[in-house]
Image (cartoon, rainbow, N blue to C red):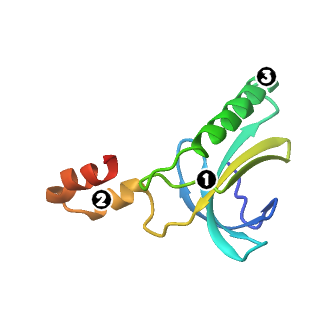
Amino acid sequence: MMSLEGMQLGQYRLLRLIGKGGMGEVYLAEDTRIARQVAIKVIQAETTGYPDPIASQEASRLFLREMKVITTLDHPHILPVFDFGETKYNKSTIMYMVMPLRMAGTLNDWLQARSSTDFSTALNDITC
């Protein structure tokens, strides 16, 4: 995946990459309408070559369905989704979701910051 730093996705300006995973990248971004920093998870689907256009359309449909479901969740241990969208860029489809910025890092970072004796307590806190 190419770096998208500096790119504008709707009202959001991607400032810098803060995380990466198997599904995509997470950027620190600024909501330019209200001058608030947010985290944006970006998933890039190639529209040329592999996967084929039908597979890209299906990925888009599934992403949209997932975002609609996630926005209905309300739980203190689940980050809300502020916004989501899709745009074309360099023959690719970029799908994104906008969430609150939490400087604690990933769930994995949070768990590793606790000692092994706190591990079961931490898991209990998350799953309750």
Q: Is residue 50 among what the camera can see?
A: no
Q: Position of residue 49 (x, y in %)?
A: 79, 29
Residue 81's label in the rendered image is 1
Q: Position of residue 14 (x, y in %)?
A: 71, 65
Label 2 residue SS? helix
On the image, numbered disc 2 is attached to which residue? 112
25 shown above or below 16: above
Which mark is first along the chain, 2 or 3? 3
Label 1 residue SS? loop
Q: Amino acid at mark 1?
A: Val
40 shown above or below 95: below
Q: Is residue 122 among what the camera can see?
A: yes
For the residues labelled 2 and 1, the Cα–Cα distance comes to 25 Å
Residue sitting at x 51%, y 55%: 79
- Residue 29 position by quadrant: bottom right
In this view, the mark in front (3 or 1): 1
Graded by Cα atoms within 10 Å as few (under 14), some (14 to 19) or many (20 or more), the crowding at tag 2 reads few
Residue sitting at x 66%, y 40%: 68
Q: Are marks 3 and 1 in contact (CB under 8 Å)?
A: no
Residue sitting at x 85%, y 41%: 91
On the image, numbered disc 3 is attached to which residue? 54
Which mark is first along the chain, 1 or 3? 3
Residue sitting at x 61%, y 53%: 81
Q: Amino acid at mark 2?
A: Gln
Question: Is 47 displayed left or right of 109 in the figure?
Answer: right
Q: Amino acid at mark 3?
A: Ile
